[in-house]
Image (cartoon, rainbow, N blue to C red):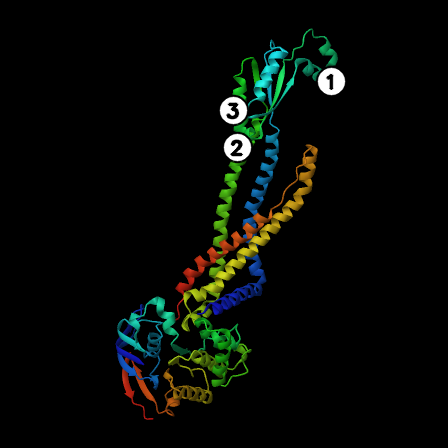
Amino acid sequence: MNAAAYFSRQAQTLVGSLGRLAAHPFASLMTIGVIAIALALPLCLELLLQNATAVTSNWNEAFELSVYLDKAVGAARAEAIARELQARGDVATVRLVTAAQALAEFRASSGFGEALDALTDNPLPNTLIVTPSPAASSPEGTAMLKTAIGAIPNVATVQLDTEWVQRLVALLDLLRGIVQLTAGLLAVGVILVIGNTIRLDIQNRRDEIEVMKLVGATDGFARRPFLWSGIWYGVGGGVFAVALVGITVGILAGPADRLAGLYGSAFHLAGLDARTILATVLGAALLGWIGSWLAATQHIRAINPR
Amino acid sequence: MIRFEDVHKRYPTGREALAGVSFEIDRGELAFLTGPSGAGKSSILKLIALIERPSRGQVLVGSQNTSKVRTRAIPQFRRQIGVVFQDHKLLQDRPIADNVALPLIIAGVSRREIDKRMRAALDQVGLLGREKSRPLELSTGEQQRVGIARAIVAKPPLLIADEPTGNLDPLLALEIMRLFKRLNDVGVTVLIATHDVHLIEAFKSRRIVLGEGRVAAMTQSTA
């Protein structure tokens, strides 16, 4: 067989198999719908994960450590510690809030002004607000920084109010594992659904396959249209899945924006990017091919002229 | 062209269809395989087309010993044999043109060549112009001619037919038989299994008469 004939035959089979799918639109759409839902589920979870990661990475940047110095430490020593911290590679900025400044701020914002007047001395210590450098902004980096600062003489306590973010990040890692597992299981499910559809398809066209084999068709030749059917099922399912996720994002974008607005955040619910869409459709086509190949290879071999 | 050497065929059900059959058909010959139903006619054709393999003995087709043809090589082997069936075995959802062209499509012949040879085959069976019809739009006799066109389109050196006139009235049956004779005249070796003894009296070709899985009688060609 020469190459040109081979490709023209492939192209014909490709279009022919599409035509056969279109000849039974209801049955084909049912199969494609099942595949689409199976693919949309992990896609939605993945999207949730991506958005959650985007949100928490914003929080990571806002990591700050409050370093409270001993009450007895004076302004000179406080400035010395500030300079020492500023020299560290994992520190971006250090801001000194003197005891007097802190008291003034507290007086202004708390509404306890008159009660504070009753105090004879300032109960607040000198405080340093430390922002980690971007490289050290990870949960691990800030934890290390916290330990290091805690070891400096005259430092009373170091407070990191973001431990819950670390727990969230750990939770997201767990969720990521669950998404991958779900995606893997559903991919196997898609292969089985397509394999089963192709198996029924082959049984319905048993006579045709018998005739083909009688006039000298190889198993490979008889298999080819079914492989294309499988690929079409996959592509159809992938496209529908992307559409489903798009609709979901469209529905949720408004409420998500309102919620973010209430928190004063500029966060916007992100949809699927072009790469993910392409990967979904191509991946689904691959699953279709695998499913149909498994079914067709096995069942066509079993069909022999009588 | 075809040689059976003490061929036995026992099916998994235990039925012994052939119990030591030997005969030979020369290249370019037209021969009839007759005998009552169950005598083993179909089994012989199935052994030739490698739909079945003998339990014992040897079947030679062309210069090939069929027992040496591996399963993977069967498609290639079948392409040198045209087969005609009693029930035509046409693809009902495809036009006549696709049905006739099927062996060429399978063999990977170029599209222009396919078109030419498909028309030539339809012309030979007198159905040129019906390419776009579906099998069910044709009469039984016409469908059988489509089956014959498909069998000869790839120009195989050997044509075998299993009760090709089984469903046809005598006039149509005779017409089909004459078609086989014409093909034989241009050099194709033809073996036809039929129980219709009256029909083949008109032809002076060789007859192999089967009975109970053996060759009961053999007449030589009187042509």
On screen, residue B102 versus residue B36, left or right, reads right
Element at badge 2? helix
Q: Amino acid at mark 3?
A: Met
Q: Amino acid at mark 2?
A: Ala
Where is residue B127? Give x, y as percent: 51, 84
What numbered label is drawn on residue A59? none
Q: Amino acid at mark 1?
A: Ala
What numbered label is drawn on residue A144? 3
Report the residue at 52% width, 36% height from top. A173
Q: Nearer the viewer, mark 3 or mark 1?
A: 3
Where is residue B12? Give x, y as percent: 31, 68
Task: Please report, as a chain letter, where disc 3 is located.
Answer: A
Whichever of labels 3 and 2 marks the residue nearer the N terminus, that label is: 3
What numbered label is drawn on residue A108? 1
Task: Please report, as a chain letter, where disc 1 is located.
Answer: A
- Disc 3/disc 2 C-alpha distance (Å): 17 Å
Residue at numbered disc 2: A170
- Locate residue A112: give its quadrant: top right
For the residue carrying disc 2, how many other residues have a C-alpha within 10 Å: few (<14), some (14-19), or many (20+)? few
On screen, residue B82 versus residue A119, left or right, reads left
Q: Nearer the viewer, mark 3 or mark 2?
A: 3
Task: Please report, as a chain letter, where disc 2 is located.
Answer: A
Say if residue A301 shows up in the picture. yes
Element at badge 1? helix
- Depth check: give the residue in front, A77 or A136: A77
Question: Residue A264, relative to residue A115: is it above or below?
Answer: below
Report the residue at 52% width, 32% height from top. A170
